[in-house]
Image: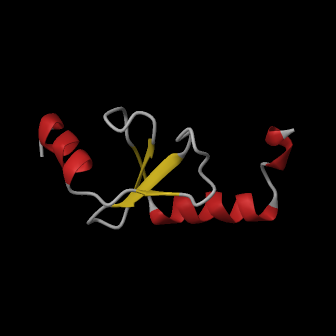
Amino acid sequence: MDGDGLTDFWRQELVWQKSRRSNPSGNCVEMAELPTGEIAVRNSRYPDGPVLVYTREEVEAFVGGAKDGDFDHMLV
C-alpha cells in the first residue's frame, strides 16, 4: 500500500477502541489491531493524524509495565 492507501485503510477499515477510562473531552489514546497482528495507536482527538504501529510484544511489555506501576512516577 502506498502512503495514501495506508492512511485510508487506517481511517476506514480498522476498528479503533478507546479505553473505558477515556474522559468526556475525548483525551484518549485509541488502539486497533492490524491484519498483521501489530497494534496501531493514535490520539483520539486527531483521528486523521499520525498513527504509531507496535508489535504485540511491545504492547504487552508496555501494558505489563503499566500494570506493575513502572510509570506511576510520571503521573504525580
Q: Is residue 15 left or right of residue 6?
A: right
Q: Is residue 64 above or below residue 52?
A: below
Q: Residue at x 37, y 41 (%)?
A: 51
Given the current orientation, which residue lies at the most extreme front position? 24
Task: Give the image quarter of residue 58.
Answer: bottom right
The quadrant of the image that shows the C terminus is: top right
Residue beneath the point at 86% across and 43% down = 73
Residue at 20% x, 51% y: name it.
12
**What's the image's color scheme?**
secondary structure
Q: Is residue 64 above or below residue 8?
A: below
Q: How many marks?
A: 0
Position of residue 72 measured from the top left corner of the image (x, y, whole percent): 82, 49
Residue closest to the eye, 53 or 7 = 7
| Residue 59 picture location, percent across and down | 54, 60
Residue 68 appears in which quarter of the rendering? bottom right
Pick the residue in front: 61 or 39.
Answer: 39
Could you tell me residue 52's position as x and y percent? 42, 43
Nearest the viewer among 54 and 18 is 18
> Residue 24 appears at what percent x and percent y?
58, 44
Q: Quadrant of residue 45?
A: top left
